[in-house]
Image (cartoon, helix red, strand yellow):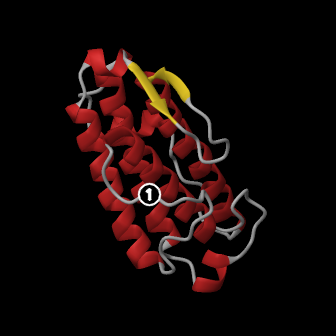
Amino acid sequence: MLDHYRMYAAYNGWANRLVYAETAKLDDSDYRKNLGAFFGSLHGTLNHLLAADRIWMKRFTGEGDAPSRLDAILHEDLASLTAARETEDARLVAFVDSLTEERIAADFTYSPITNPSVVTHSLRAALTHVFNHQTHHRGQCHAMLTALGGPSLSLDLIYFLRTEGTEFL
């Protein structure tokens, strides 16, 4: 499982770089335009992804700042949001690299923001959610980018594996 999560952490950073590079080509009004996604715009959705990752990393490590809202706008401008995203992606890679198979299989307990109660399941389930959540909202970003006239990005995991090497195959 550890190799599986290392692959997903590396893929996550790669896919985020592609989405952010395409987003950087937009003018500010398109970047902030409400296109009907769950968090409205690319600005809202990319901020949500960073907020959610910070919340999960605080749960996983006990360290770092975590917003108290899933719709928090952590950065008003794309340049600082991009830098923060790159830092968070590196943080996620380092966290996964610090894990053992035993820790991944062990119980993990936390309290959700949306329903403050105690939840316990394996760390494996929580990590799977984090990467799936990123993929879900990157898909929304992809749809918004293409709606704004951008190219259809090849974000599939297999493209990452083909471009980044075969160490995960």
Q: Quadrant of residue 9?
A: top left
Q: Residue furthest right?
A: 36
Q: Position of residue 159 (x, y in %)?
A: 43, 39
Question: Measured from the top left, where is residue 96 in percent x and y?
Answer: 29, 35
The percent position of residue 79, horizontal first and vertical second, equals: 40, 77
Q: Of 8 and 56, which appears nearest the observer?
A: 56
Left or right placement of residue 47 versus residue 98 in this view: right
Q: How many C-alpha atoms fall within 10 Å of the one at disc 1: few (<14), some, or many (≥20)?
A: many
In the rendered structure, the answer to whether residue 26 lies left or right of residue 158 reads: right
User: Which residue is label 1 attached to?
Assistant: 66
Q: Is residue 122 visible?
A: yes
Give the structural element (helix, strand or loop) at label 1: loop
Q: Amino acid at mark 1?
A: Ala
Q: Nearer the viewer, residue 155 or 139?
A: 139
Residue occupying image coordinates x 56% and y 31%: 118
Q: Please tell me which residue is depicted at 38% across the width and 48% down the height of the picture.
A: 58
The image shows residue 1, relative to residue 32, as above or below, that is: above
